[in-house]
Image: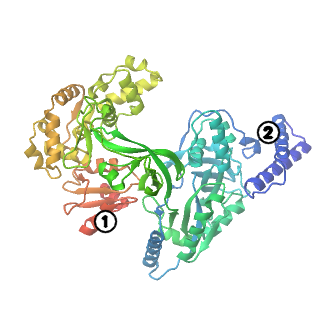
Amino acid sequence: MNIPKSILERYKKLKKAVEKHRYDYHILNKQDLSDEALDSLKRELVDLEGQYPELVSPDSPSQRVAGAPLKGFVKVPHKVAQWSFNDAFSEEDLGNFDMRVRKMLKEHYDKEVTPTYTCELKIDGLKVVLEYQKGLLQTAATRGDGKVGEDVTTNVRTIESIPLSIEEKTNLIVEGEIWLSKKEFEKLNKQKAKAGEELYANPRNVAAGTIRQLDPRIVSERKLDAFIYDIAQSVQVPKTQLEELKELQKLGFKVNPHFMQAKTLEEIFSFWKTWQKKKEKEDYWIDGVVVKVNEKEYQDVLGYTGKAPRYAIALKFPAEQVTTVVEDIVLQIGRTGVLTPVAHLRPVLIAGSTVSRATLHNEDEIKRLDVRVGDTVVIQKAGDIIPDIVNVLTELRTGKENKYVFPKKVPECGGDGSIERVPGQVAWRCIERNSLQQQKRKLYHFVSKKAFDIDGLGPKVVDVLLEEGLVISFDDIFTLKRGDLLALPRFAEKSVDNLLEAIEKAKRVTLPRLIIGLSIPQVGEETAYLLAENFQFSIYNLQKASQEELEKIEGVGPVMAIEIVKWFKDSGNKKLLERLLKNIEVISETKASVETSLKGKTFVLTGTLDSMSRDDAKEKIRSRGGDVSSSVSTKTDYVIAGESAGSKFEKAQELGVKVLSEKDFLKVLSE
């Protein structure tokens, strides 16, 4: 179809005008045209595209309109690896970061080097990676695991502050943060309250949940926003971070305007302290300041660890502390019958989320804090850590507060509900070990990744199986039939087939995983492997072991030995194990049958690894004949230190034990 010249010219002008007003409003924060007038221009543009479909292009304003719901998200590999920042929480932490930067630069250049830094606000949202090809938005992806993300292009196209095209017709990958304004967050929660629904916890969670909606119309309605802060890949990247931010602005991206260059740590601290006070005035959530070495040449020299850039750090704002009231203290039953006191709090917003629980750990902690039901307490939360009660505001007591005393009986424990304090420990536990609550937790543990690793058999499914009487003990899982499951609510044929396939696969299990799954008191993952190795990988040998034999194993003390012997002598456990062994096959796995490149070497892991989970790392060590321990001693050969390594790292340094970075560990595995 031939498009009349007048129509073509009108369309081009409309497109340019709509884009200009979008840029003015969403990027420059100014409005020269009313919303109604802008909508009128958009309608005319859409009408012309309806008459002349050839006019439609990927960067047309009409393409922001949400389409039909998606069936799911496609995984997309990142062309540039995605990193997260290490955290600092104090001036001392930042000083140490600066010292590390200067030391590495001095070693590289063989002279003193003085870097400058940029300070940028750390927006509390969802990271997004945008790829432009020849100036057009091609792909938008979530961070994912850093190597592979989810393709959320359709949803991101609805965000007005993200350009569908840039003036320079170049190939470019940029990174930024998607966020929901406080104003929109409050609006959504008013709608939820009106409908009698549970309120959203915080804007970050809503932004993350929104961008993963399968219906783009919902994304469009929620008016997400975005700040872009980094050019990850380009034909020519600016020489400094400061120039890079200005280049992003020039290209038409929305960049947070509050950034600065700092030449001293004092300037960084000043910026950080200023924004601790000013953050509430902005319409987006800020949880710290990102400090980056400004010079790109120095950034390249410093490079990356397994998880984070060495040239940047997130200087987080201090953990929030708020006050609330303890409304009750209840006992939570663990899978081994141990009772943990939990404070039920008057719901309170802290660090971006509403909390109503805080752990009190044990009876001694309750006494130390002198916390009572009815007390006003200070709770603290940093990041996603479970809140702690810091102290009690005794000056606010009225005299009506009640001291908490451990009861003699807890009905949920089963039997007559009796409880006892574990000899030599601060913990209390149920005397009857087979209550429903315990059984649930034991089953959750039995099917978990560390034990039988049955995919698709999570807590909700376990609960349904228990409620319907289909599963009472571990062995029942392996006798489930297709017809049993199809009768259950929300179980379709495909999900039933997948679950049965996972159960069939789990029937072949190694002895350590079997021991872990049995929930023997005091026996954790490391002990399970010790027991398997010391009893020739035979469950029958372990069953016959005496207390004396067990105590000879390094790492097995008297209390643990007693619990192991007691478990295997219990008549109920004997019958359970007998039934279980009829339905599963314990795979023969001896040291001689595996690769032995790490034979005789003992490893301890601390911190978080980027390339694999700690469970995977342990599996790799053991598959090569090595041992894994939970504590550092003079007999430890290596400590593998990942991100946020803790006291084990310090212990290794004290004892002179060799510490491996994740990169070093991967090298050891490859050798």
Is residue 234 something that shows in the picture?
A: no
Name, please, the residue furthest toward the right: 6
**Of helix, strand and loop, which one carries label 2?**
helix
Instruction: Give coordinates of residue 209: x percent, y percent.
Output: 57, 42
Instruction: Give coordinates of residue 662: x percent, y percent.
Output: 36, 59
Instruction: Give coordinates of residue 287: x percent, y percent.
Output: 55, 58
- Please give left or right for residue 105 compared with residue 652 in the image: right
Question: What crowding class fits label 1: few (fewer than 14 Cα within 10 Å), some (14-19), or many (20 or more)?
Answer: few
Give the residue type that dot 2 points to.
Glu
**Of helix, strand and loop, which one carries label 1?**
helix
> For this rendering, which residue is in front, 300 or 236?
300
Location of mark 1 (residue):
650
Q: Is residue 306 above or below residue 67?
A: below
Name, please, the residue furthest toward the front: 399
Q: Which mark is residue 612?
A: none
Is residue 545 something that shows in the picture?
A: yes
Question: Residue at (55%, 40%) from the top-left corner?
Answer: 74
Quadrant (top left/top right/bottom left/bottom right) for the C terminus? bottom left
Q: Quadrant of residue 276?
A: bottom right
Spatial CA distance of label 1 from label 2 is: 66 Å
Labels 1 and 2: the sequence-earlier one = 2
> For this rendering, which residue is in front, 439 or 484?
439
Instruction: Give coordinates of residue 347: x percent, y percent.
Output: 51, 45
Q: Which mark is residue 54?
A: 2
Confirm or deny contact between disc 1 and disc 2 (CB under 8 A). Answer: no
Give the residue type that dot 1 points to.
Glu
Q: Is residue 259 above or below residue 575?
A: below
- Please give left or right for residue 24 compared with residue 193 in the image: right
Q: Quadrant of residue 306?
A: bottom left
Question: What crowding class fits label 2: few (fewer than 14 Cα within 10 Å), some (14-19), or many (20 or more)?
Answer: few
Disc 1 versus disc 2: nearer the observer:
1
